[in-house]
Amino acid sequence: MPSPSDINGKLAILADAAKYDASCASSGSKRESKGGLGSTEGMGICHSYTPDGRCVSLLKILLTNYCIYDCQYCVNRISSDTPRARFTPEQVVKLTMDFYRRNYIEGLFLSSGIIQDSDYTMGQMIEVAKTLRERESFRGYIHLKTIPNAADDLIETAGQYADRLSINIELPTVGDLKTLAPEKKRPAIEQSMDRIKIKREEITSDRKRGLRVPQFVPAGQSTQMIVGATDSTDQDILNTSSVLYGTHQLRRVYYSAYSPIPHADARLPGMSPPLVREHRLYQADWLLRFYGFDASELTTPESQNLDLDIDPKLAWALRNRESFPIDVNRASREMLLRVPGIGERGVKRILNTRRHHAIRDEDLIRIGVSYKKARPFLITSDRHPEPLSLDSVGLRNRLRPKSVQLSLFDAFESAATGQV
């Protein structure tokens, strides 16, 4: 067992404790720096993906896994007998710079259990970020977890040093939170999100007026939701995500399949949900943010969970066959985005191509859409779908992908590209 009294022992404990947090992808901001940056794997180093598909390496650790809260789904809850450790802010700074100078990482993802109280813990994390920026001239990426119930002025200070802030919404509904984590309050979590949103809007407004103001969370804010710890449906999850994107202007919601923990509360399931459920949620999330779908369109009152056999866009198209086929040479961008097998890049290429000539079947293949999946839903200049082809009872089976073993990378890759 790692010793919590030496740095390597602390790193082993606190890197392992951080693995349950999925929301560590960096994106959006740039800080000027010199020298190459590597991606060597190592203890506490994770690979994350930016929205443009770029892979980055982060040192992903907790400041401490001691915690005064007793969230039943969390391995670091106060009642857990997990091994404990705690870094000082100076030790985190040293670790980060050591890894950074060796080109192992491009940034730091720092979270923490809550010690003493929220403000004290948030202050310790700020001290890490401030020391890295001001004393060490660190220009890498920093993602800080915002501690629930931390004071507004501390959150604002954290945002001056971090590229991204995130505060976990934890569970899909208020009822879920009351049941499994009663010490955490949804209104307080959303208030912190709103404070970050308002501050970002103030900075944007000042810059539009030509004022020189310090940057504030240039990569925005994100959150994480645990999937499968309660009976909440995918509709519940997507409704919550839709509010977070709309009301609080989050950049990302990350979905983390519940992982059973030792000595768990009897109300928690004994097994993790299938990984494909997490995968489908990431695909549905992309449809909400970039494809113009509403959360209510992705499930039905009769079936409030996403179909695990096929992707959510294909499921929607099969439920709305009366909307198809559409003419690829005349359809709007918004409608093309709803065609199964055509992603954002494919739509852009279609729009560019049809400015010059009518699109034929061979153009779709050249453009790079998923031709087999898109074909039944499209009319091209040289092909009309066969009569009643969309009504065929076998269409779903023909378009359903072959059963494969889904890896965790597939969910990350889908979240990065969104090409569904």
Image (cartoon, helix red, strand yellow):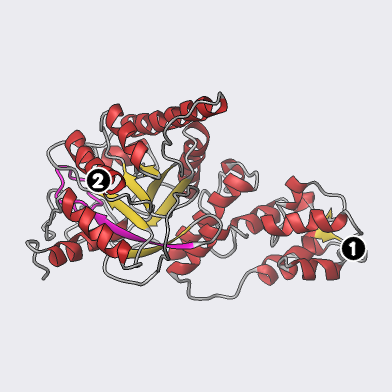
Relative depth, front residue between 53 and 193: 53
Pointer 2 residue? 131
Question: Magenta stretch: residue 57 in it?
Answer: yes
Q: Secondary structure at mark 1?
A: loop
Relative depth, front residue between 101 and 240: 101
Range drawn in magenta: 55-76
Residue type at tag 1: His
Circle 2 residues within 10 Å: few <14, some 14–19, many ≥20: some
Residue type at tag 2: Thr
Q: Which residue is depicted at the point 22% across and 42% down?
A: 127
Circle 1 residues within 10 Å: few <14, some 14–19, many ≥20: some
Q: Is residue 241 visible?
A: yes
Q: Is residue 231 visible?
A: no
Q: Which residue is depicted at the point 56% across and 65% down?
A: 309
Which mark is drawn over residue 254? none
**At which x and y percent is residue 245?**
51, 39
Determine the image quadrant of residue 47. Answer: bottom left
Relative depth, front residue between 33 and 59: 33
Q: Earlier in the sequence, mark 2 or mark 1?
A: 2
**At which x and y percent is residue 296?**
58, 41
Kindly report the distance in space between the C-alpha atoms of the residues bearing marks 2 and 1: 64 Å
Q: Secondary structure at mark 2?
A: helix
Question: Magenta stretch: residue 271 in it?
Answer: no
Compared to residue 32, the image places residue 150 above or below, namely: above
Count of residue discs: 2
Q: Is residue 359 left or right of residue 365?
A: right
Compared to residue 413, the image places residue 219 above or below, namely: above
The residue most toward the left is: 5
Pointer 1 residue? 384
Q: Which residue is depicted at the point 56% across and 44% down?
A: 301
Q: Is residue 266 left or right of residue 195?
A: left
**At which x and y percent is residue 286?**
57, 51
